[in-house]
Image (cartoon, grey):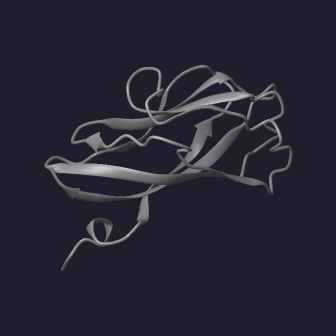
């Protein structure tokens, strides 16, 4: 059976319990061997507390997660019922096999809070 992730934009990963306060990389998705990956958007949802103060989050690969979208401001997510859609605004990067896509709070939330992060995109042969 064909892998839907190679034929349509689909949910690549859903990671709960992502720390939105501490300045440390959280791994979200590792690109499979033999594949390339185009990430189309990321949804940050269901925070356990307000993300007030969380004015800078970077997404991408590498230690600093600064290769896809930088400076995402989530401070308006003050309710546990909020969600936020992140997408690349200009130039996109194609991720290679073994790359680890993640998020890094540069200026995280004031309160200790976790969230669920959904990564969407598609894979194709390298």
**Position of the N terminus by quadrant:** bottom left
Q: Is residue 82 left or right of residue 103?
A: right
Q: Along the line of sight, which residue is nearer the eye, 85 or 110?
A: 85
Count of all numbered marks drawn on residues in the image: 0
Q: Quadrant of residue 29?
A: top left
**Residue at (13, 49) in percent of width and height:** 34
Q: Is residue 57 above or below residue 8?
A: above
Q: Farthest residue in the front direction?
A: 90
Q: Is residue 18 left or right of residue 37?
A: right
Q: Is residue 106 left or right of residue 83?
A: left
Where does the image place residue 83, in percent across and percent down from the top left? Answer: 72, 54
Q: Is residue 29 above or below residue 125?
A: above
Q: Is residue 102 left or right of residue 21?
A: left
**Residue at (80, 57) in percent of width and height:** 81
Where does the image place residue 6, in percent across and percent down from the top left? Answer: 26, 66
**Residue at (58, 39) in percent of width and height:** 18
Where does the image place residue 62, in percent across and percent down from the top left? Answer: 38, 25
Q: Is residue 48 above or below residue 70?
A: below
Q: Quadrant of residue 28?
A: top left
Q: Quadrant of residue 105?
A: top right
Q: Along the line of sight, which residue is nearer the eye, 34 or 15?
A: 34
**Residue at (35, 36) in percent of width and height:** 100
């Amino acid at each position: 059976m064909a892998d839907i992730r190679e034929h349509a934009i689909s949910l690549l990963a859903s990671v709960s319990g992502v720390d939105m306060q501490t300045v440390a990389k959280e791994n979200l998705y590792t690109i499979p061997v033999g594949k390339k990956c185009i990430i189309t958007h990321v949804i940050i949802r269901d925070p356990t507390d307000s993300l007030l103060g969380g004015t800078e989050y970077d997404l991408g690969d590498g230690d600093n997660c600064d290769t896809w979208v930088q400076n995402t401001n989530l401070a308006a997510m003050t309710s546990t019922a909020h969600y936020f859609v992140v997408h690349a605004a200009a130039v996109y990067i194609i991720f290679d096999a073994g790359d680890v896509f993640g998020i890094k709070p540069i200026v995280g939330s004031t309160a200790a809070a976790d969230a669920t992060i959904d990564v969407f995109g598609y894979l194709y042969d390298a």
